[in-house]
Image (cartoon, grey):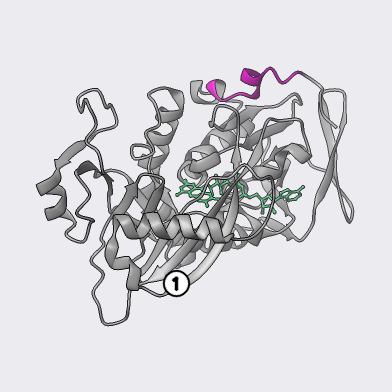
Amino acid sequence: MSTTETILIVGGGVIGLSIALELRLRGAEVTVLSRDLQQAAGYAAAGMLAPQAEAIPPGPMLDLCLWSRSLYPGWINKLEAMTGLTAGYWGCGILAPVYDIPPSLDSDSRAAYWLDRHAIQHHEPSLSSEVMGGYWFPDDAQVDNRALMRSLFTAVQDSGVTVQDGETVVALLHQGDRVTGVQTDRSTWQADHYVLAAGAWSGDLLPVPVHPRKGQMLAVQAPTGKTLSLKQVLFGSEIYLVPRRDGRIIVGATSEAVGFTPGNTAAGVRSLLERAIRLYPVLETYPIQELWWGFRPITPDEAPILGFSPYQNLALATGHYRNGILLAPATALLIADMIFAGKTSPLLAHHCHTRFGFKEHEST
Ligand SMILES: Cc1cc2nc3c(=O)[nH]c(=O)nc-3n(C[C@H](O)[C@H](O)[C@H](O)COP(=O)(O)OP(=O)(O)OC[C@H]3O[C@@H](n4cnc5c(N)ncnc54)[C@H](O)[C@@H]3O)c2cc1C
């Protein structure tokens, strides 16, 4: 492709913006159309970079996640150098405490290190006395996803990408096997190449099997004057605690198949608080600072849909479910390589939409 060609990205979440930046840095003219930048799951997330704690089974998805985790420090350095803004990366490791010792520790392939009760209590003295041991994943990490989104947005704008916020794409226009434009609620846009990166809403524009999976979250603040004891992520049973360097602790998350139903519920918040206090009892005195929710884009096999679409000039980058923050740098490289150099890696091939039997020309 020549560098004068134009690329239009639908969706200004972490995936759309990451791809936009990579394409722009390679010389393309890039436009991002987004209904609402603040609606993106990237703002709602916890920012864990946790392929091991998430217990992703061995295979192409784990390979993709581990590769993306390894790209993170360099990617963050680049963003911070471009913008002067911190993107909040913290290689703090993730501790996964358990209340019941697993029957076979050896067979658990995700175990980087097993800590017995004594060792884990020594490692994190404020843990519940119910904790019987846990796994320590020193290579898993976190990023302050809101700081990342700010830094990414600034980098995208400073590099010359056109970001059109507040504009909803209502249809992909096509002729034969080519997309010829996008119809928005205001106008029509055209480009040489298109990328669908609309997160949980992607199914509105193409019959891809991507659906919303709601997650409720809250944040507490360690009282001022107290030094924060929590210095790594705690990844418990159906609960995680993600400490930020400023003393905030992000508590997440519910996982609810309720469509796009907005809002925090009493039951959702209660379940988060009960599980968090059980795991880390000192938290019960910390003031609640904020409640929010977001929609993860889930697919039937919980892995993203990347690369080719039924249309020659449309790339898919959606369905990142619980790992979209983690997978942003790898997704950006893979999609840019595909559009710019026609390169398809095995990681793209494994994550192609065809694994769901999604046929040619099924589009709107
Ligand atoms: C509670 C919660 C916790 C999470 N925790 C983590 C975590 O710890 N680690 C991790 O790696 N991931 C986590 N995730 C997942 C991660 O946030 C998502 O996978 C990721 O943000 C998806 O990025 P995206 O760009 O595809 O979609 P989004 O970030 O949702 O962005 C999609 C964008 O597209 C726009 N859009 C949609 N439809 C249209 C349209 N028709 N026209 C124009 N624009 C449109 C939207 O307005 C939005 O701005 C979490 C998610 C949630 C909800």
Residue 81 against residue 238 in the figure, above or below? below
Tell me the quarter of the image containing the C terminus: top right
At label 1, counting other C-alpha atoms closer than 10 Å, the crowd grade (few under 14, some 14-19, many 20 or more) is: some
Tell me which residue sits at (66%, 38%) in the image: 211
> Residue at 79% across / 57% down in the picture?
167
Where does the image place residue 126, in percent across and percent down from the top left?
A: 21, 61
Left or right position of 23 against 329:
right
Residue 277 located left or right of residue 341: left
Q: Nearer the viewer, residue 179 or 278?
A: 278
- Residue 40 in the image: state x and y as whole percent: 62, 54
SS state under label 1: strand
- Pointer 1 residue: 288
Q: Which quadrant of the figure contains the N terminus?
A: top right
- Magenta-drawn segment: 350-359
Vertical relation: 169 (above or below) 288: above
Q: Is residue 358 magenta?
A: yes
Q: Is residue 15 left or right of residue 164?
A: left
Q: Residue 99 in the image: x percent, y percent? A: 26, 43
